Image (cartoon, helix red, strand yellow):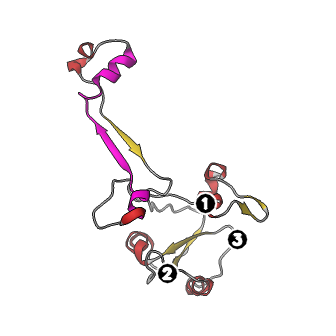
């Protein structure tokens, strides 16, 4: 049996970090998080249970976080629909139509460091990065692209141009 090696590439869902993102991109990618403490939620919690806040232990409810975010916040996968309404002449799949098992499997990291956000990466560069791995891409293989922006997180886990 082949042993599957899972590598956690997730990044946190967080509010905008000063200097990390700028302008409209920051507004689109950063989460908005509103924190509610035990005292602030007492009225809501009491309403759920049909009592008054005084009936709750020490008059306290539960703490919670309300999160508003884009589908591009934190770690995410872009569905084919994100790029275009059709794929191969058929309606492109939305994220809820992607089977979970399509997200796990053998993969390859193509090292495209040297590219900054917004840089165009040409097919010749992708082919060269693939050749540096020492084997052709296999059908169904999950391809991860490492750019200068992602290099610190991905390469810390896998090293450059690896397969597995």
Instruction: Compare marks 1 and 2 and give the one earlier in the sequence.
Output: 1
Please give the residue where the numbered disc 2 appears in the rendered image. 112
Q: Which mark is in front, 1 or 3?
A: 1
Q: Which mark is in front, 2 or 3?
A: 2
Q: Is residue 159 above or below residue 96?
A: below
The quarter in which the N terminus is drawn is bottom right
From the viewer's perspective, is 143 left or right of 41? right
Q: Secondary structure at mark 3?
A: loop
Tag of residue 82? 1
Q: Quadrant of residue 157?
A: bottom left
From the viewer's perspective, is 118 left or right of 47? right
Q: Is residue 156 above or below residue 79?
A: below
Residue in the picture at 68% in, 55% down? 93
Residue in the picture at 26% in, 12% down? 55
Instruction: Compare marks 1 and 3 and give the one earlier in the sequence.
Output: 1
Residue in the picture at 33% in, 18% down? 46
Residue in the picture at 29% in, 13% down? 52
Please give the residue where the numbered disc 3 appears in the rendered image. 139
Q: CA distance from mark 1 to mark 2?
A: 22 Å
The x, y position of residue 66, in whole percent, is: 37, 40
From the viewer's perspective, is 76 left or right of 98? left
For the record, the magenta segment spans: 25-49
Residue 46 on the magenta span: yes
The x, y position of residue 110, in whole percent, is: 53, 78
Q: Is residue 28 above or below residue 19?
A: above
The quarter in which the C terminus is drawn is bottom right
């Amino acid at each position: 049996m082949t042993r599957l090696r899972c590598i956690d590439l997730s990044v946190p869902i967080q509010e905008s970090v000063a200097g990390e993102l700028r302008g409209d991109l920051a507004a689109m990618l950063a989460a908005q998080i509103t924190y509610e403490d035990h005292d602030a939620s007492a009225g809501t919690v009491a309403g759920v249970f049909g009592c008054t806040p005084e009936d709750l232990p020490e008059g306290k409810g539960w703490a919670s976080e309300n999160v508003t975010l884009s589908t591009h916040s934190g770690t995410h996968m872009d569905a084919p629909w994100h790029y275009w309404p059709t794929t191969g002449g058929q309606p492109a799949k939305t994220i809820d139509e992607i089977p979970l098992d399509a997200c796990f499997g053998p993969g390859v990291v193509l090292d495209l460091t040297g590219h900054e956000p917004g840089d165009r990466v040409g097919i010749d560069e992708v082919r060269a990065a693939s050749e540096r791995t020492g084997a052709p891409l296999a059908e169904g293989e999950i391809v991860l692209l490492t750019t200068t922006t992602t290099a610190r997180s991905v390469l810390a886990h896998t090293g450059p141009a690896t397969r597995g």
